[in-house]
Every structure is written in structure tokens, then in C-alpha cells.
Amino acid sequence: MSKESRHELVRSAFRLNAENLGRRVVSGASFTFLGIALRTFITLGSTAILARLLTPADFGHVAMAAVVTEFTGLFGGFGFANLLIQRKTITRLQMDTVFWASVIIGLILTGVVFILAPLASWVFANETTGALLRLLCFSFLLNSLTVVHEATLSRLMRFRTEFWILITVIGVRSSVAIVFAYLGFGVWSLVIGPLFGAAASIALYYSAIPYLPRFRFHPAYLKATWKVSGSYFGSNILYYLNMNVDLLLIGRSLGATPLGYYQNARSLTDEIRGRIAMPLQRVLFPAFSALQNDQKRLQTSVMRAGRLLAAIIIPVGVGLSAIAQDLVPVLYGPQWLAMIPLLSMFGISGAIRGATAISSSLFNAMNQVPLAFKYNTIGTLLTASAIIVTLPYGIEAVTLAVMLSNLYALVTFRIGLGLIGLHTRHMLDILGYPTLAATGMWIAVILIRTWTKEWINDAIILLLLHIFLGATFYISALLITSINYYKDVIIFIKSQTQLRK
């Protein structure tokens, strides 16, 4: 790519473009759904292999270390990436400023975690945790190098490029982890894999977006945006607490093995949010930002996107809950049977959080991050209180408490819809029918299992049969109860067909 072309590509990201927005969102959603399928396949396949090469305690040790790295990692971006995506117009100087600010913070975090790693060993009463952190901490520096490139891809809505980058990175990460686990590196394989993935990410993002920072820094820009970026950061802090306070308490109180069961059950259902909801948020956030001054178009887009998201995520989460008894022995092996009841509850939790995840894009796009921070604070306090109260009763009680506290996501979802003039009836229109159909599916699978297990002995065939019957029941029930979902799918297919012409 010539120097002129490189500059032109970067300059094209300076202003959000709302032209052909519908077609670009459809294209982004298409690659997102394809990415979901491939990434889920890679993740489940690698998990099945690693679960047989490693022990529950190995996963527990990494979960303890992740509590520290995820918290420290919150300081890495400090909301800068979202700030670049949300603004209608940005400048090259602002991009350079965000880049160097991110790198400086990344260097500081790497040094701090490396030095204070022994403290984590004391907190968790586990020496392995500190040793792992001494290697994991370098991910902060690696990740800081792509903050601006990721934001630029989002502004340009180049979802095809993002798709290939993400697929390649997860492939590298999983392959390296499996190879090192097979060679006998044990728990270290779960750390080495992500580091190789981060290195691959740098090479791919710099190849896709040939942005090279200039040696200049504009502190006034960071100061002027401190309130907004601080609100993004505050919301991330709350999200971290929501997602990690349970790991901290369980790891400290119950040890690595119980935490390994808990974390793997939770991470599998987090795939619903991480592989479906979060990628779609990357598509929808810049799209909603471009429409923030056109409420009617924004309402239509939100309703259609919300229905499609709920129609996909709710049955996946509820389905995981229904087939947990079949899935765990097949995917993880007999040493993981203790996580079956945990996975059953986390499936419901994942359905709730994933189906309402669109609210985050609404708060961000409407520049209402401080308001989101207030509501998220309440949710975090509810979750933390529930965990503290139930911890003495064991892992299953904590899991149940987390599932029930996640019902609060419905409140923030309703508030987010209200920002664009939508009401409770619209929320019910989005969530109601998929919930009814998925509930019927859950009951049907449980009832079917009472007699299928009597005449089918092969665990894999039993799992596939229950998935097929559950999916058939859900799709039939959803289309019978609401024609809107059928219309949304037809519109999506037509838009994609026109896009390919």
C-alpha cells in the first residue's frame, strides 16, 4: 500500500459515515454470525482437548490470575477506544494521543503487575498464581498497541476484516495452548497460548489498518474528554467487579479445584455473550452512534436488532441449561461431572445477560455513559451482596445467587430502550416470545430425556438428538407465536442478497 493510500484510509475514519448504513450493518451482522459459528467451533474443540490434557486445578489457577489481570487491564484502555468510536468526528492528533496514552499505561501496568505478583500469591494463598502473573502481565503491553487500530476498524465498519483477524487470533491462541499442553507444560499452556494470540493480533491489525503513530501528544484532548472516558472506565470497573468478585471469593475460600469447575461452567455460558452479544455490539455501537440524531431510524434498527439478538441468544443459553447433563461428559470428560448443576444455572444467566446486552450500545451511542454507570453500580452491589451471603453454602448456592442477581439486567435494558423513546411493551416484544419458546424447549428436552436415555447408550448421539429436538421445538414455537421474527429473518436475507449483487 502506497503512502498516499495509507493516509487516505486513515483519513476516511475521521468522520462517521451514515451512508448505506443498513447494508453495512447487515454485512457486519453476516460476518459476525459466521464468526460466531467458527469461533464457537474452535473454542469448544480446543476446550474438549485441553480439559483432557489438564486438570480442573490448572483452570482454577489461571482463573485466579485472571482476576488480577482483568482488573489491571481495565486501566489499559481507560475508555479511549469507545471515545474514538462514539465521536462523529475525530482528528489524527487525537488518534496519536490515544495511542501513546494507551502504550504508556500498558507499560506501567506490565511493570506494576510483574513487581506485585507475589502479593497475588498471598491473597489467594497459592504460589502458582504469582508465577503465572509474571508472564501474563506482558499482555498489557501487547494489547495496548492495537487500541487505535481496533477503534479505526469499528469506525470504518470493516467487519469482514475484523472477522478474519478474530478467527486467526483465536486459532493461533488455541493451537499454541494445545501444543504446549500436549508437550507437558501443564497450566503454563493456558498462559502461553493467549500471549501468542496477542502477538498475532498486533501483526494482523497493523496489516489491516496501516496507521503508524506520530511522535506527538495532546494532553488537552485527554483532559477535555476526562469525564466521558472516566465514565467508560467506571462502567468497566463495575463490569469487572460483577464478573470477578465471585472468582476472588471462591478462589480464596474454596481453592483451585472448585474454582476450576465454577470458572469453566461460567466461561462456557459466557461464550453466549462473548461470541454472540459482544461481537454484535461492535457492529451496532458505531451504527447506533451514526443514527443518534435520527430517532425513528434508530428505534427501527434497535427493535429489529434486539429481536434477532434475543431470538438467537435466549435459546442458546436455555438450551445449554437443558443439555448440561449430556454436554459435560462429552465435552469435558468424567472428571468434570461436578460442574453439571453449575452449567445448568449459568445457562439461564447467560441467556439473560446476552439478550439484554444491546443496552450497553444504546447508553454509549446516546452518550449516556454516566447514567449507565449509576445503574450498573446498583447491579454490582446486588451481585456482590448475593455472593457474600451465599458463599458459606457452597458453589451451587453462589451460582444460584449470581443467576438471580442477573435479572437486574432487565432493568438496565428497559432504561436503555427509554433513551430512544421505547417503552416496556417494546421490551416485551423483543424478549417475550423467545423466552416463552425457550421455556417450552427446556421442558420438552427434560421430559424427552426420561425415555431417550433408556434406549440410547451412546453419549454423543444422545447429546446431538437432544440438541436437534430442542432446536426444532424452539424454532417451531417461535414462528407460531410471533410472525415478527420470521419477517426480521426475511428482511435480513433480502438485505444480504442485495448486498451480494
Image (tube, helix red, strand yellow):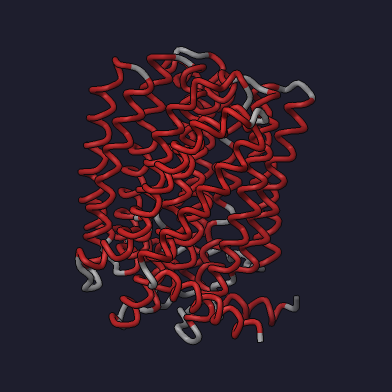
Residue at 47 percent across and 18 percent down: it is: 258
Residue 119, picture quadrant: top left
Place of residue 171 in the rendered image (x, y in percent of width and height, measured from the top left): 70, 47
Return the residue nearer the eye: 64 or 467.
467
The N terminus is located in which quarter?
A: bottom right
Residue 140 screen position, x and y as percent: 54, 42
Above/below status of 388 relative to 464: above
Q: Closer to the camera, 409 or 285? A: 409
Quadrant where the C terminus sits is bottom right
The quarter of the picture where residue 434 lies is bottom left
Measured from the top left, where is residue 428 in percent x and y? 26, 61
- Nearest the viewer among 148 and 259 is 259
Q: Is residue 190 visible?
A: no
Task: Give the total of numbered labels.
Answer: 0
**26 lies left or right of 119:** right
**Residue 434 shown left or right of residue 214 in the figure:** left
Is any part of residue 447 visible from this angle?
yes
**Residue drawn at x 20%, y 67% as measured from the top left:** 423
155 left or right of 53 in image: left
Q: Quick check: 207 above or below 261?
A: below
Q: Establish if 324 lies above or below 234.
A: above
Q: Residue at x 60, y 27 (%)?
A: 329
Residue 60: image location, x then y, percent: 52, 23
Q: For this rendering, which residue is in front, 99 or 13?
A: 13
Is residue 194 found left or right of 353 in the rendered image?
A: right
User: Which residue lies at the image location 57% right of the left edge and 44% below the top edge?
Assistant: 141
